[in-house]
Image (spheres, helix red, strand yellow):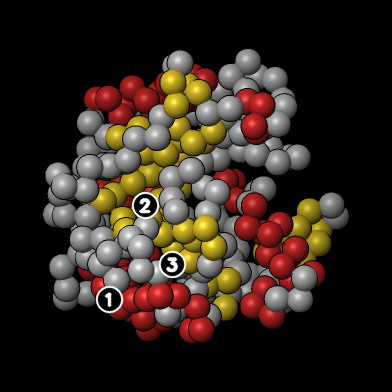
Amino acid sequence: MSASQIEWTDETWNPIAGCSLASAGCTNCYAMQMAHRLDAMGLEKYKDLTLKQGKRIVWKGVVREDYNALQAPLSWRKPRKVFVNSMSDLFHERVSWSFIESVWQVMKDTPRHQYQILTKRPKALREFIESRSEEPLPNVWLGTSVEDRRVVERIEEIRRTPAAIRFISFEPLIGSVGNLNLKDIHWSIVGGESGQRARPIREAWIDEIYENCLRYNCTFFFKQWGTWGKDNKKRSKKANGREYRGRVWNDMPNIETRDQR
């Protein structure tokens, strides 16, 4: 748990450690690299979660439920936005539903915080939500990652999921997503890939999402160009900046007008 440098949240909370690759967006996952470093530093939670394949670090598919980490948000007195499991996926097939229920209980007990859950497994998320008899928690946002048109079906799973806020993270955006239906999606985050092996982003791909956000009244947030700028030149993330169409887009969804359907 730590104060986050991620532009759209305040804090990260990781009751789960470890993951496995789900689609092309996972290829250069920063969490794999971070888990490898934390293992090297001697953190037991991250021990043997990754392995080296040639010059790459990859997940081994080991997932750990960390009961000690569950209580952390209870001690945070100041309200904050909390990204749940930046180092894993709460709806990985190896995470037990009983543990997910424990996470839900902590979120229920801390309504002062806004929790942001992002998954590449939205079908499992929807099944979990629909299995519960309670109404959606008003302080829990549910989202999925879409990196290109090959996984746009994830949007439909999120649209069908009852939630206070439904959002899509188009990051790393590595290809066109085409003409999207963003009906009942409240927020879209767009960003390019960073790091040594980053794949290029194209301004036209961002334009597609931006135009669809306007069409469906979906709040647009531009996180970064990443390692590739809009001129298709590779440089540092900081050098490429965060401006799109002449401004920085830090807009958040309006939680007062949300539809929890």
Q: In this view, does 40 lie above or below 57?
A: below
Q: Is mark 1 on a helix, strand or loop?
A: helix
Query: CA separation, marks 2 and 1?
Result: 21 Å
Q: Indicate left or right for 105 with 148 as reference.
A: left
Give amino acid for label 1.
Asp
Give amino acid for label 2.
Gly
Residue drawn at x 23%, y 57% as measured from the top left: 163
Question: Is residue 117 something one can see in this rendering?
Answer: no
Q: Mark 2 points at which residue?
A: 143
Q: What element carries label 3?
A: loop
Q: Indicate left or right for 31 with 82 as reference.
A: right
Q: Sort mark 3 into few (<14), some (14-19) or many (20+) by Cα contacts within 10 Å.
A: many
Q: Name the residue under label 1.
A: 109
Seen from the viewer's position, the closer of residues 41 and 157 is 41
> Nearer the N terminus, badge 1 or badge 3?
3
Query: CA separation, marks 1 and 3?
Result: 21 Å
> Nearer the N terminus, badge 3 or badge 2?
3
Residue 106, quarter of the rendered image: bottom left
> Which residue is at the far front?
78
The disc label shown at residue 91, or none: 3
Q: Position of residue 158 (x, y in %)?
A: 31, 52
Q: Position of residue 132 (x, y in %)?
A: 22, 74
Query: CA separation, marks 3 and 2?
Result: 12 Å
